[in-house]
Amino acid sequence: MITNLKEVLKDLDYELIKGNLDINIKDVKDNSKNVQEGDMFIAVVGTEVDSHNYIPNAIENGAKVIVIEKDVEIKEDVTVIKVKSSRKAVAKISAAYFDYPAKKLITIGITGTCGKTSTSYIIKSILESAGYKVGIIGTIGAMIGDKKIETNNTTPNAYEIQKLFYDMADQGCKYMVMEVSSQGLKMDRVAGIEFDYGVFTNISMDHIGKNEHEDYEDYIYCKSLLFKQCKVGIINIDSEKYEEITKDHTCKIINYGIDNEGTDIKASNIKFISEDNFLGEQFDVTGAMNDTFRIDIPGKFSVYNALCSITVAHYLGIDAESMKKALETVKVNGRMELTSSNSTYKLIIDYAHNKDEMNNLMEAISDYKPKRIISITGAGGNRAKKRRYDLGEICGKWSSLTILTNDNLRFEEMEAIHNDIIVGLEKSKGKYMIIKDRKEAIRYAIKNAQKGDMILLLGKGHENFLDIRGVKYPWNEKGAVLEVEKELKEEKNKRKRRIKRTKNRI
């Protein structure tokens, strides 16, 4: 760690308000509760909390350096530094404190409305197939090799990012793959990082509202910031707004796509394959490389995610055989995850919970010509109602039956959430039923499945909890499915034994 105050401040424009720069700090904190003796405390103006108000607490806990962006009177004997933006200061000071760990890794940042998580895990799988140790940061958490680390946001806070980079480099990772959210860019969580590769998957209207983005233009602009802080941009040329995303870019641009000619790498001849334990696609790749690939994740958008990953891997110099091996075996927890496949039904777990994700999912599943689509879903409480209307309308349009059940209710009543979803279901004339207990909803769908059915378990994906009135109750989608199947099998075997005993008595 770099602890000399002058050194950790060297990338900043700052004003020394009082105190001494010729000192060392112990650590960098932006939460006064976490401050210990000898730390630097950076006061940040957040969307809900202004931590300038907690400077006295930080000093009481032992802070010897205070960084501010607002004029605050501080009488205590501490060093006070003023900057224009405390959020940027957290990012740049943290990078310096950990001795710029991003420069010791090959960094790949992925932004987009959909596909960030799946693409990041496909890239990770390809790189590991080629023999490299990889770190990853994103919605599902962070991983260093096989070690899982819990995080609070898709793009964690700036200090946490730099700490993860430091640990990745220290533990022998060569590559780092990271989901870079629009909020992460807007809130300067990745300020000062020059990514080796910036990736754009797609964009559509989402995350518009209080404490997110004021409008679609702001959302697009924040996404575009990644391509002002990377060396090479990998761009989905089929996505709307890609020209706005790359406007004023400062990087080399490489395009990939399916529907447009003139791309650097293009996918074509897509075939949808449904086998006993394979539900995915085969496609040809032409342009900068020429080969045929298969991916064991269903849907045309999975071809986009695979093609994006292939493009990144190709320009990293990874061989085609490593790509093929990874694509045919990769699974992304809770993302179009084929969890159960038998002669009667296939059951897929997916995190889909907004309009675009739902449409993508339903269109993907329809390509495999299922007899029926059975959707099991709820919706998150204390979130935009429009999501619920859309969810209901899309489920009603595509599903033979929608089973409404529990989800992250947060501080809303389940009945109110279901009523909103029903508005959409009735608009598309969808058949539905309500089974409040999520495990019982799964049981009903599996028990009543018909040959050729696709059962979609939606909304929770990788999450390992149900958030109800501030309490996170343990929950595991895959575990629940396996439990139900085991219980139904045992019930079936008991019936067979009863029938056999009855026949023997007769």
Image (cartoon, rainbow, N blue to C red):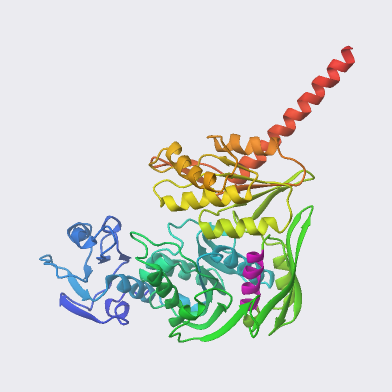
Residue 415: % across, % down: 45, 36
Task: Say which quadrant the N terminus sits in.
Answer: bottom left
Residue 416, x across and y down, in percent: 42, 39
**Relative side of 25 to 262, left or right:** left
The magenta region covers 300-313
Quarter of the picture containing the C terminus is: top right
Count up the numbered dots.
0
Q: Is 422 on the left-hand or right-hand side of 42? A: right
Foreground residue among 61 and 151 = 151
Quadrant for residue 374, please give it. Answer: top right
Confirm whether the magenta stretch covers residue 302: yes
Which quadrant of the figure has residue 359? bottom right
Residue 89 screen position, x and y as percent = 30, 73
In the displayed structure, 126 sits above or below 420; it is: below
What percent of the width, then of the height, locates residue 15?
Answer: 19, 80
User: What secondary structure prevails in the magenta region?
Assistant: helix
Q: Kindly give the residue lying farthest to the top in the view shown.
A: 506
> Does the magenta-highlighted stretch encompass residue 306?
yes
Query: What residue is rendered at 30% in x and 63% in y?
Result: 30
Residue 463 in view here:
no
Task: Please state which of residues 302 and 370 is positioned toward the viewer in this rendering.
Answer: 370
Q: Residue at x 72, y 72 (%)?
A: 322
Task: Name the one closer to the observer, 439 or 3.
Answer: 439
**Image point (51%, 44%), residue name:** 378
Instruction: Examine the rendering and report whether any part of residue 49 can be seen.
Output: yes
Q: Is residue 391 above or below residue 53?
A: above
Residue at (44%, 73%) from the top-left corner?
223
